[in-house]
Amino acid sequence: MNICLSAIAALARGAGEIVLTDVIESRLELARSLGFKTVNVMSKTREQILLELGQKFDAVMECTGRTECMQLVIYAAKPGSTVVLVGLAPRDKMYELPIMLASVQEIDI
C-alpha cells in the first residue's frame, strides 16, 4: 500500500492533517483503519475532489504517476507549498501538468 506507506512516512516527519485519496475502496478502508482521513476520487471531477478535500495543503504527495492525479496535486497545493511527485507519468504526458499555475503560485515541485 504505497499511499499508506507515504502517509506513515509523512506522519513520522511531523505532518499535521493527512488526507489520502484513491479509487480503490479497500485501500481507503485500510488508511481509515490507520486513522487517516480519506477521499474516494472515483468518477469525480477535479472541482468535486477539491471541494471534498475542503482545503489546500502545505505539502502534497502524488504516488500514482497518472497525469490527472499529477495535475490535481498542483491544484490542491497552497501557494508557496511543496508538491512531491513519487510516481511519474510517461514523458509524453508531462507537458499536461499546469506548470504555469505552479510557477505563479511559487509551488516547489
Image (tube, rainbow, N blue to C red):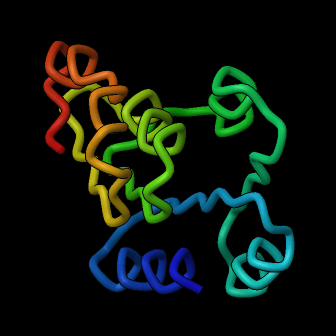
Where is residue 24? Give x, y as percent: 80, 67
Residue 107 in which image quadrant:
top left
Where is residue 11? Give x, y as percent: 41, 78
Residue 9 in which image quadrant:
bottom left
Q: Is residue 1 above or below residue 104?
A: below
Where is residue 76? Give x, y as percent: 46, 34
Q: Who's the residue at 27% across and 16% down the image? A: 101
Camera-nearest residue between 39 and 1: 1
Q: Is residue 79 above or below residue 25?
A: above
The quadrant of the rendering that contains the N terminus is bottom right
Camera-nearest residue between 68 and 74: 68
Where is residue 4? Give x, y as percent: 56, 81
Q: Is residue 56 left or right of residue 47?
A: left
Q: Who's the residue at 18% across and 44% down the image? A: 109
Q: Who's the residue at 50% across and 50% down the image? A: 66
Q: Hey, which residue is sitting farthest front in the picture?
A: 92
